[in-house]
């Protein structure tokens, strides 16, 4: 027995030693790719020495003797810190993920190939001015210099993921950066999904009033009634099978509810306590680890520029110079239209046009799949745009047999000059020159807020389609592609885009809300991203005569829900403090406790409070009860509460209270009945998920920010190192926007919000501040992987200074790039 025990101990010891050796070996290999920031590197294709000074938050301040060398330095810095992110995003837009990830990403590759974004980016390079092309070439050379250094010095292939997935890396090209911009446009565009959803809902709800209940128009001037979708495209079933959206974290295709959003506001000098203009901006995108945003300062010949960049793009997208500040918000401009194209019954390779049948433009495309056979696609285009598969956003449900769906979209331009416009903006010195600089910006459409030392302004930038006044659906529903009135007639002139300069009130802002109401076809959109946050923002702006940097920060971090304050009195009007005291342990007693908590609640979606969770669960259960019987399986598509729908129902606008009656039951249910039943549903769910002690609930436990690694986030054990999870305040409709996932499990996880925040004060520009949601590095072994995450969570910021001495005084390293001798 002793001998057996001795050998078992030896075996256990050996296994422990081997495990330790393996862990140490893996750590050593992974750590080889950690960049050395205090370094001197001899690189090709550089005119003069470049310095990359990294301040104590690891924000690179890049100094060179000419602009091309500065962009070279930015490319090198991006590749040092975010190589895996850049390579993965490039593969995504190229439709080449399956070469690395196998069959799991075939669906993503199929779709991206059909959109044809990368070939369009390649063609767009020729449309750029020489200065922009030179900047892109210099940036690409900087990325490639880092790749050369990784290969020559055996630096662990540049990122741990590169070792794990054995990814071949091609040199970076200017077209790659243009393609990244188009990928961002794809992630920020939601009208395609919205058109399909509206069409499917129209089929399920023939009554136009009920359609406007569940898909309400933003408040404002009325909109003329539209035809039912069944009249535009007959022969479709009322309900069709749901095709679930691919939830692969690498997919750029998100539900409409998780399309781009943002906040931005500005104050003129006479509304500023310091006497200088103010601007705040926090763009909202899906959370990832690392964040999509990367902070950087570029010292250009025109002056220093600092703010948020996206790795792969050589431009500060939101930020400031010494003279100008700019911020972006999603405009929700209607820049996409779906068409139903009729196939020739005698030749399915042709489609119907206003002039008869015409052959598709076709091209074969081969998808290489790791550990599997390659797939050959036939890409087809019509005059209106690319043919999309029926599985995409359930297009099959609104496409009759013998037809296919196509999409027109401004981002499908083969002469896209958006990046050139963004680079010109960085060199602008005033609001006037800034507005002129972005005239050639195409997609994605944004609201651009601008501030110089004297003036504030906001303008919608990007191409807006010119539609015929006789368009059958005004762009709100898919229409037949062979009707000439439905087809686009070019784009509207830039001068006609909405513009607000130096308003009399001295305050400008946008929360993706409706900015103006112009009649079709000169409208911007019928669909807007916010009707709620704007109410709270207006209240915060108007309660002060003058604002400060700190009051703008306070507004960015505000967690009071206007929606909760307005809806709770409505839905609980006949429930508050009514009836007899209930016995402990009964459902009635639990409901009473919940109502007492909500009655004393201010509407603040604070992570430490129980009321936000009770409120959110109640509203979610209430909408589910209201729509299930009318919409059937389509109800699954409405996974976020629509506040205007709830308000219409409980105020009985145009008879909307009819939603409260369950069609399949004999009794006639009232809205108070539904509110009571929904609260019971919510409390049962809370009890099963979080426990029955309502007073001890924490909203932050359910509302965790999910900064998850797109490729390693679900790997056992490793996910605890690469994912950054945080308890957070805010919610769907607060200025501190924490958009919830909406789907089970964990429907209230915070998956979409402000990955970047910045507030700039032009009375003292170097007192400006900014922050991102994770850290500068994409390397999970780096201390800069999550160094900004807790600051972001607590609502703190770091200095946003163009003071070179300050950056050098607290630097964590200086990388010198030296031109190689010829």
Image: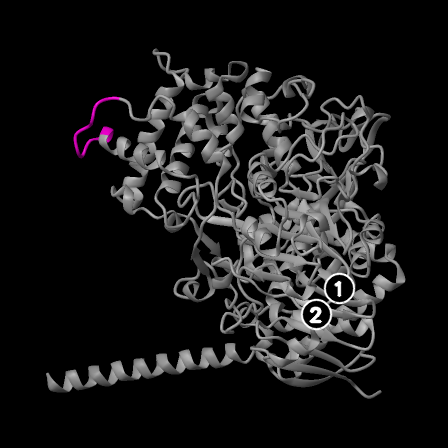
Residue 689 position in % (x across, y down): 31, 44
Kindly identify which residue carries mark 2. 802
| Residue extent of the magenta highlight | 579-588
Residue found at the very far right of the displayed protein: 130
Question: Which mark is on residue 421?
Answer: none
**Image vertical order of residue 780 relative to residue 19, above or below:** above
Identify the main secondary structure in magenta.
Answer: loop
In whole angstroms, how far apart are the C-alphas of marks 1 and 2? 8 Å
**In the image, is residue 472 part of the stretch drawn in magenta?**
no
Sequence-wise, the earlier of marks 1 and 2 is 1
Q: Which residue is found at the position 73% from the left and 67% from the top?
A: 172
Closer to the camera in the image, 812 or 799:
799
Residue at x-position 46% and y-position 78%: 27
Q: Secondary structure at mark 2?
A: loop
In the image, is 237 to the left or to the right of 420? left
Quadrant assignment for the C terminus: bottom right
Left or right placement of residue 665 versus residue 281 in this view: left
């Amino acid at each position: 027995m002793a001998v057996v025990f001795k050998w078992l101990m030896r075996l256990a010891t050996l296994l422990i030693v081997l495990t330790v050796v393996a862990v140490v070996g893996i750590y050593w290999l992974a750590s080889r790719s950690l960049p050395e920031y205090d370094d001197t590197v001899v690189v090709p294709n550089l005119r003069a020495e470049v310095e990359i000074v990294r301040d104590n938050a690891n924000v690179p301040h890049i100094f060179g003797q000419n602009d091309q060398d500065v962009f070279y330095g930015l490319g090198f810095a991006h590749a040092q810190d975010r190589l895996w992110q850049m390579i993965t995003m490039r593969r995504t837009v190229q439709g080449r993920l399956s070469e690395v990830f196998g069959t799991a990403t075939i669906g993503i590759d199929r779709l991206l190939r059909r959109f044809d974004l990368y070939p369009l980016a390649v063609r767009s390079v020729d449309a750029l001015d020489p200065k922009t092309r030179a900047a892109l070439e210099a940036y690409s050379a900087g990325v490639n210099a880092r790749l050369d250094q990784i290969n020559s010095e055996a630096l662990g292939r540049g990122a741990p993921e590169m070792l794990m997935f054995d990814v071949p890396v091609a040199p970076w090209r200017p077209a790659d950066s243009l393609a990244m911009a188009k990928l961002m446009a794809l992630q920020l565009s939601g009208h395609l999904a919205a058109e399909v959803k509206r069409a499917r809902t129209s089929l399920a709800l023939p009554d136009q009033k009920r359609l406007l209940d569940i898909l309400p128009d933003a408040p404002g001037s009325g909109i003329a009634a539209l035809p039912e979708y069944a009249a535009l495209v007959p022969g479709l079933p009322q309900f069709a099978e749901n095709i679930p959206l691919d939830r692969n974290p690498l997919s750029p295709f998100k539900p409409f509810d998780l399309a781009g959003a943002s906040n931005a506001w500005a104050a003129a000098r006479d509304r500023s306590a310091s006497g200088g203009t103010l601007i705040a901006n926090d763009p909202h995108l899906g959370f990832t680890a690392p964040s999509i945003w990367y902070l950087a300062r570029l010292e250009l010949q025109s002056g220093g520029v600092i703010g948020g960049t996206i790795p792969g793009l050589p431009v500060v997208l939101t930020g400031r110079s010494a003279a100008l500040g700019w911020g972006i918000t999603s405009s929700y401009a209607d820049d996409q239209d779906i068409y139903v194209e009729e196939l020739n019954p005698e030749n399915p390779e042709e489609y119907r046009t206003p002039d008869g049948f015409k052959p598709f433009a076709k091209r074969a495309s081969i998808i290489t799949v790791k550990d599997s056979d390659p797939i050959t696609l036939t890409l087809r285009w019509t005059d209106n745009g690319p043919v999309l598969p029926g599985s995409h956003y359930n297009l099959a449900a609104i496409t009759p047999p013998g037809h296919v769906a196509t999409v027109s979209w401004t981002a499908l331009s083969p002469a896209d000059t958006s990046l050139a416009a963004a680079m010109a903006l960085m060199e602008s010195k005033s609001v006037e020159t800034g507005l002129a600089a972005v005239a050639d910006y195409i997609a994605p459409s944004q609201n651009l807020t601008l501030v110089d030392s004297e003036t504030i302004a906001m303008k919608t930038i990007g191409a807006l389609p010119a539609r015929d006044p006789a368009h059958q659906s005004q762009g709100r529903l898919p229409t037949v592609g062979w009707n000439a009135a439905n087809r686009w007639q070019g784009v509207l002139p830039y001068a006609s885009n909405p513009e607000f300069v130096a308003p009399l009130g001295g305050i400008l802002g946008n929360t993706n809300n409706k900015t103006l109401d112009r009649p079709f076809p000169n409208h911007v959109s019928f669909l807007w991203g916010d009707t709620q946050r704007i109410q709270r923002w207006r209240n915060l702006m108007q309660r002060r005569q003058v604002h400060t940097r700190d009051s703008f920060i306070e507004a960015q971090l505000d967690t009071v829900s206007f929606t909760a304050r307005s809806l709770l009195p409505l839905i609980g009007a006949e429930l508050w403090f009514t009836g007899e005291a209930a016995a402990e342990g009964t459902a009635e007693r639990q409901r009473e406790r919940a109502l007492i908590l909500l009655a004393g609640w201010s509407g603040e979606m604070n992570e430490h409070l129980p009321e936000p969770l009770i409120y959110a669960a109640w509203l979610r259960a209430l909408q589910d009860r209201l729509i299930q019987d009318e919409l059937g399986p389509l109800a699954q598509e409405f996974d976020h509460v629509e506040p205007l729908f709830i308000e219409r129902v409980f105020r009985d606008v145009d008879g909307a209270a009819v939603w409260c009656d369950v069609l399949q039951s004999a009794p006639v249910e009232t809205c108070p009945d539904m509110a009571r039943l929904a609260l019971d549903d919510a409390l049962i769910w809370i009890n099963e998920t979080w426990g029955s002690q309502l007073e001890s609930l924490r909203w932050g436990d359910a509302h965790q920010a999910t900064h998850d690694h797109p490729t390693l986030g679900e790997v056992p054990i490793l996910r605890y190192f690469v994912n950054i999870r945080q308890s957070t305040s805010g919610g769907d409709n607060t200025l501190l926007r924490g958009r919830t996932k909406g789907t089970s499990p964990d429907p209230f996880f915070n998956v979409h919000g402000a990955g970047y925040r910045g507030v700039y004060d032009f009375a003292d520009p170097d007192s400006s501040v900014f922050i991102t949601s994770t850290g500068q590095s994409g390397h999970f072994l780096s201390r800069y992987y999550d160094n900004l995450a807790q600051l972001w969570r607590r609502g703190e910021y770091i200095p946003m200074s163009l003071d070179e001495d300050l950056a050098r005084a607290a630097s964590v390293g200086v990388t010198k790039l030296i031109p190689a001798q010829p």
